[in-house]
Amino acid sequence: MEEPTFQQYVAGVSNAMVPVLLLACGRDQLTSVDGARKLFARVQRGRLVTMHGSGHFPMVEAPQKFAEILRQFLNVAVPD
């Protein structure tokens, strides 16, 4: 059974009217890549990226790669 807070999160992300960046990390012990794929299937706008070598904090574990993913996403989602 899903927690109400998680259900609210899924509903909020799914109903967002802006492009969404979902970053799934292969070594994340709190969330799964499969869970991110299922959520993105509901969102269907934006981008899903998988960082196989990172855990729950890719911005700390691989800051350059994280910044590049974010930069690429923002360049498309928010053009000049």
Image: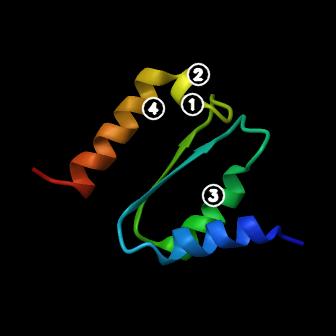
Q: Which residue is mark 1?
A: 58
Q: How far apart are labels 3 and 2 at the CA level? A: 19 Å
Q: Are circles 3 and 2 on residues that touch, CB within 8 Å?
A: no
10 Å crowding of disc 2: few (<14), some (14-19), many (20+): few
Left of 62 or right of it: where is 37?
Answer: right
Which secondary structure, mark 2? helix
Which secondary structure, mark 1? helix
The residue nearer to you, when weighing 60 against 45, is 60
Three-letter residue code for mark 3: Ala
**Mark toward the start of the polypeptide (3 vs 2):** 3
Q: Which residue is mark 2?
A: 61
Quarter occupied by residue 39:
bottom right
Q: Are circles 4 and 1 on residues that touch, CB within 8 Å?
A: yes
Three-letter residue code for mark 4: Phe
Which secondary structure, mark 4? helix
**Mark toward the start of the polypeptide (2 vs 4):** 2
Which secondary structure, mark 3? helix
Query: Residue 5: image x %, image y %?
Result: 73, 66
Q: How far apart are labels 1 and 2 at the CA level? A: 5 Å
Question: Residue 37, relative to residue 66: is it above or below?
Answer: below
Three-letter residue code for mark 1: Pro
Left of 68 or right of it: where is 80?
Answer: left
Q: Which residue is mark 3?
A: 36
Q: Are circles 1 and 2 on residues that touch, CB within 8 Å?
A: yes
